[in-house]
């Protein structure tokens, strides 16, 4: 499963009831009133060539979430309530606007959670997602109907083709949703089994520098602090270069980056660190800090700093 895709009208949630029931206590109930959650997330992404920043993007998002149990299944409704993006250089802003608008379709979902992994296993409003995509596709075709440059038109058609191929395959869409850091952090094992969150695991990272390259990350967890209702975890990963297609990475580097950087390929590295606070009473995430860095040492690097906070 791919993970961590970074480049990726205001609505409101009407809430009639809030409940204090813990998910762990109601998991076997036929149906429960929803637990209402709100999160704000801030992400900074920077790309460096020769240790000099060449582009920089900041994203601020607010998510509204409803958790409930229905016939023994955990159902989660997610609404991307606010979506603010700033990018430098500004000539990249129009492309970012397209991806941002597309996320309003992908991120507004009602899903069923896998009872073993805590990940999404089904999109319950998938028909609505498809309908919204068709409207979006029609609108952007009309918006860019003025295009005269054949290369620009080809790029737009490529964007539409790739997005549609992903959205019209529910499995691929779920993978892409999980590639967004909020969903990867929120939908995790703590939702269904708190004892599992301390165990080591492996996830596959989809490279942001090299197309089609998957990087297995072997993640270990350490308890930093705990009290009855909270636990703070520190997670960090290691990579094994024997598991990575470094020949493909070098080939792509020579074609894509060496003409810009000038220097020959050095070595590939990746860092992944997470600080996470989990509410063990309610089985929900309270906050998280994520640091990601992928690089060909001293030559090209992409750095991500991500902060998630639950708000009232």
Image (cartoon, rainbow, N blue to C red):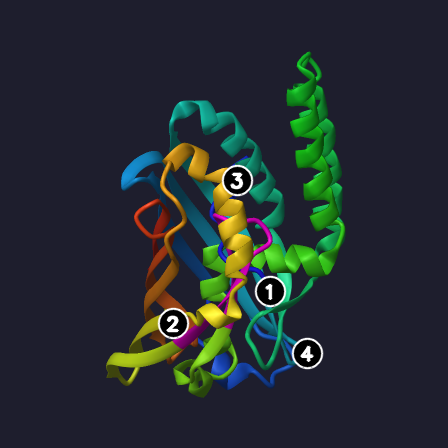
Mark closer to the observer (1, 2): 2
Residue depicted at 63% across the width and 63% down the height: 111
Residue at disc 2, secondary structure: strand
| Res. 73 mark | none
Task: State the separation of the CA atoms marked 3 and 1.
Answer: 27 Å
Q: Are marks 2 and 4 in contact (CB under 8 Å)?
A: no
The percent coordinates of residue 262 (x first, y second) are 37, 36
Residue depicted at 46% across the width and 57% down the height: 182
Task: State the separation of the CA atoms marked 1 and 4.
Answer: 28 Å
- Mark 1 is surrounded, within 10 Å at the Cα level, by few (under 14), some (14 to 19) or many (20 or more) other residues, namely some
Residue ID for mark 2: 238
The percent coordinates of residue 142 (x first, y second) are 71, 20
Write the start and end of the magenta stretch as one range: 203-219
Residue ID for mark 1: 1
Residue at disc 1, secondary structure: loop
Mark closer to the observer (3, 4): 3
Residue ID for mark 3: 255
Task: State the separation of the CA atoms marked 1 and 2.
Answer: 18 Å
Q: Is residue 227 left or right of residue 261?
A: left
Task: State the separation of the CA atoms marked 2 and 4.
Answer: 40 Å
Mark closer to the observer (1, 4): 1
The C terminus appears in which quarter of the rendering?
Answer: bottom left
Q: Nearer the viewer, residue 38 or 175?
A: 175
Task: State the separation of the CA atoms marked 2 and 3.
Answer: 27 Å
Mark closer to the observer (2, 4): 2
Instruction: Specify which label sits upstream in the sequence, 1 or 2.
Output: 1
- Mark 4 is surrounded, within 10 Å at the Cα level, by few (under 14), some (14 to 19) or many (20 or more) other residues, namely few
Instruction: Specify which label sits upstream in the sequence, 2 or 4.
Output: 4
């Amino acid at each position: 499963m791919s993970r961590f895709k970074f480049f990726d009208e205001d609505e409101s949630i009407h809430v009639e009831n809030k409940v204090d029931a813990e998910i762990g206590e109601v998991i076997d109930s036929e149906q429960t009133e929803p637990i209402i959650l709100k999160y704000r997330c801030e992400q900074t992404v920077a790309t460096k060539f020769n240790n000099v920043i060449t582009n920089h993007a900041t994203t601020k998002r607010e998510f509204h979430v409803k958790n409930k149990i229905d016939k023994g299944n955990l159902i989660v409704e997610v609404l991307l309530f606010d979506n603010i993006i700033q990018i430098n250089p500004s000539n990249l802003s129009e492309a970012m606007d397209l991806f941002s608008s597309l996320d309003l379709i992908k991120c507004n979902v009602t899903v069923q959670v896998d009872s073993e992994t805590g990940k999404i296993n089904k999109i319950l409003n998938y028909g609505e997602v498809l309908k919204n995509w068709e409207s979006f596709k029609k609108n952007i075709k009309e918006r860019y109907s003025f295009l005269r440059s054949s290369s620009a038109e080809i790029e737009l058609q490529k964007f539409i083709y790739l997005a549609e191929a992903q959205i019209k395959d529910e499995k691929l869409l779920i993978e892409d949703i999980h590639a967004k850091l909020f969903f990867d952090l929120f939908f995790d094992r703590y939702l269904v089994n708190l004892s599992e969150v301390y165990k080591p695991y492996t996830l596959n990272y989809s490279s942001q520098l090299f197309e089609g390259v998957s990087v297995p990350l072997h993640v270990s967890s350490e308890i930093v602090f705990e009290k009855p209702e909270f636990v703070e975890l520190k997670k960090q990963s290691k990579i094994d270069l024997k598991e990575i297609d470094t020949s493909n990475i070098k080939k792509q580097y020579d074609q894509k980056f060496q003409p810009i950087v000038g220097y020959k390929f050095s070595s590939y590295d990746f860092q992944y660190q997470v600080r996470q606070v989990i509410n063990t009473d309610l089985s929900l995430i309270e906050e998280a800090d994520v640091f990601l860095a992928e690089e060909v040492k001293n030559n090209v690097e992409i750095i991500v700093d991500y902060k998630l906070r639950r708000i009232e």
